[in-house]
Image (spheres, helix red, strand yellow):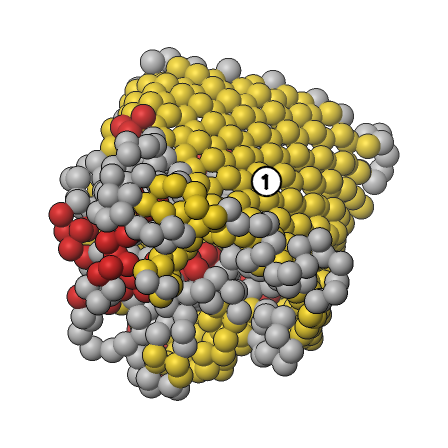
Amino acid sequence: MKRTLLTISILLTMGLSAQKKEKNNDASSLDSIQKLDEIVLSTSMIFGNKYVAKHRTGSAYYLSPKELQKFSFTDVNRVLRSVPGVTIYEEDGFGLRPNISLRGTSPERSSKITLMEDGVLIAPAPYSASSAYYFPTIARMEAVEVLKGSSQVQFGPSTTGGAINMISAQIPSKFSGKISASYGSFNSNQLHAKIGGGSSSFGYMLEYLNYGSDGFKTLPSGKNTGFNKNDFVAKFKINLFPNAAIKQSLKFKFQYADEVGNETYLGLSQADFNVNPFSRYSASNNDKMTTDHSQYMLTHKLDFSKNFRVTTTAYQNNFSRNWYKLNDVTFNGEKKSIANVLEDPITLSNHFSILNGVVNSEADALGVKANNRKYYSQGIQTKLDYHWYKGDLFHDIEIGFRYHYDEEDRFQWVDKYSISNSGDLNLTTAGVPGTNANRIASAKAFASYITYKLKIDNWTFTPGVRFENILLQREDFGKNDITRTGVDLATRENSVNVFIPGMGANYKFNNDFSLFGGIHKGFSPPGNQDGQESEESVNYELGTRFNLGKLTGEFVGFFNDYSNLLGSDLAATGGTGSLEQFNAGEVNVNGIEVLLNYNLAKEGSKISMPISFGYTFTNSEFQNSFDSSDGLWGTVAVGDEMPYIPKHQFNAALSLEYSSFEINLNARYNGEFRTLAGTGNISENEKVSSNFIVDISGKYYVNKKLRLTANIINLLDNTYAVSRVPAGLRPGHPFGLYAGAEFSF
């Protein structure tokens, strides 16, 4: 299959230069077109615009401000669907905690990809507990960068599938602002405002976003099943010594977000999903997620010349959360997890009757766990970029260093409830904080990399190597030492030193056709168990970019050869929630990514009609057998496919753009996928069926400052399941209608 993919990649020459050039009416826009060789990017961006993304020696995609504004999505799942190679399974219908995979990496809580905001690691504890229970609010982002392939050795710790960098609102060069508001189905509402300005010596930007919903699921009690989220960002920039030969600047960023959501891990049985997919069982009535997140960043930029820049960023992220949610059910002294009950509600019918509130239970029948955790992440990173010409040769050297520390502090407890046949929950035993989990996992990491770019005639070469030195530790104080005196302290640690090489190349036949490819080592940190090995792979890609008149495209074939795939025991995937990682052995993942763009309108027409089509094929195959208690994997045999990775996905978008209005249509197909590893036909109780969803948006420009907006989510009102984890079937977002207005100045 590997050889076939590489051959097809050479022959078909089609795909993603869908990175088409957009007309730029704002000289300060992120999407400005610049000559590649003259750009020295800051550490906050990977590409900075479509032109740079289009000329990477690896596969890359830049979602521009214009593209993000078409639908103004608050759901990152819907934003990333248009990017080939991205696989997502939904959970809550609003994209609050996405599960993202790049090129077949394990999607669980996006833990196997590198997530960044403004070039800084943004997962709560990216080394010691990489599951992304916090995800930046996509509605406040100006651009999104997705990097795959060999040139990603610059970004870690996870290098197998790729990196996603979200670029927040930039400081404008002159006084300006925008305020927008919308309201719609399920009492969903959004208010977004930002203001900023600048001069040659000082700039600022202030931003506030609030959005929420009553939710589209229903509880017997009538309680709200939605959420409310606030987000505030402030940025300030000072140009130091403006008359000096060496230019310097300082930029400070502060971000704060909080969320309260009545969300649960408890889904539905197949029978109940078939009757009413948007219902919730009474036992989940008290489930609630509360979070607080803050980020501090201080960036110093030193421009020695137009060819040499040093950028240093110190950062600190703080995240606290308490997901108070139903965890287990006890009947006649036999305790079962909610995942086990939903997997077999017939055999465990007595437990199931307690879940759905049709019986009067005994005391302490329901265990509601306070998953109370605090995360801390801080570090300092420096990037040196120097480029120069020598004759016809262009050289660019980039060197980066980062020292990073993060930790996850678990201090959890379980409250016990009874439930009546009217669905009322009554607290029967209050848990003591710290008696369920009482431990701290931490990581110290030093990372460095060097990449070199050489352009000679039509060739571009980008060799590079990354080094990671990681010390992972855990201190478990035990369930009986809630004051953490250390009397029952158990410790363990694991360390890893790894070099991660990569090499990419691009050959430009002419301005309309190029061929690129690369090879690099994939890596993901292990857990803190002594002697546990890292996740490692060797990854290949080969692709082309082309322009044929108004048609632009890219075609890429990829092959990831895992020598050691790691799985994690997450409650979010039906496991116990211990976060213990386990070796899953050898796996082959290969696939094809295609993206095409075309404008249906005639040259010179007053109307523009851009159309795009993206397709992803992903095939996976375990090369060894193993058994795991983790619900996302199950019992695995040689030849089995990975779960939660559909073979086929496509996305199609069509826009009608005129001076006074625009209409945007987006359709996506997500193929069926299995929920446990296996091969052949998928049994109904281990399958999530395919779905086809259409979204539509429109804008009417009243004048240059005022716009009216309308969005429809799931236009065809298709009812579909998105997953069977954490516990039971979960529905996607039903038909939703939203209207609003935007005012800019």
Residue located farthest toward the top when viewing the structure as drawn: 703
Quadrant occupied by the N terminus: bottom left
- Secondary element at image label 1: strand
Depicted 657 relative to depicted 130: above or below: above
Horizontal side, residue 276 vs residue 697: left or right: left
Q: Percent x, y for residue 458?
A: 52, 64
Q: Residue at x 34, y 80 (%)?
A: 636
* The image quarter in which residue 70 lies: top left
Q: Percent x, y for residue 383?
A: 72, 54
Please state which of residues 686 and 452 is positioned toward the viewer in this rendering: 686
Q: Residue at x 71, y 35 (%)?
A: 252
Depicted 724 relative to depicted 702: above or below: below
Horizontal side, residue 540 vs residue 216: left or right: right
Q: Is residue 377 visible?
A: yes
Q: Residue at x 66, y 31 (%)?
A: 235
Please state which of residues 93 and 493 is positioned toward the viewer in this rendering: 493
Please state which of residues 604 and 135 is positioned toward the viewer in this rendering: 135
* The image quarter in which residue 515 lies: bottom left
Q: Percent x, y for residue 622?
A: 37, 81
Q: Is residue 127 visible?
A: no
Q: Residues within 10 Å of mark 1 (few under 14, many from 20)?
A: many
Q: Percent x, y for residue 493?
A: 69, 72
Q: Residue at x 57, y 29 (%)?
A: 232
Horizontal side, residue 292 vs residue 427: left or right: right
Q: Which residue is mark 1?
A: 293
Query: Which amino acid is tagged 1?
Result: His
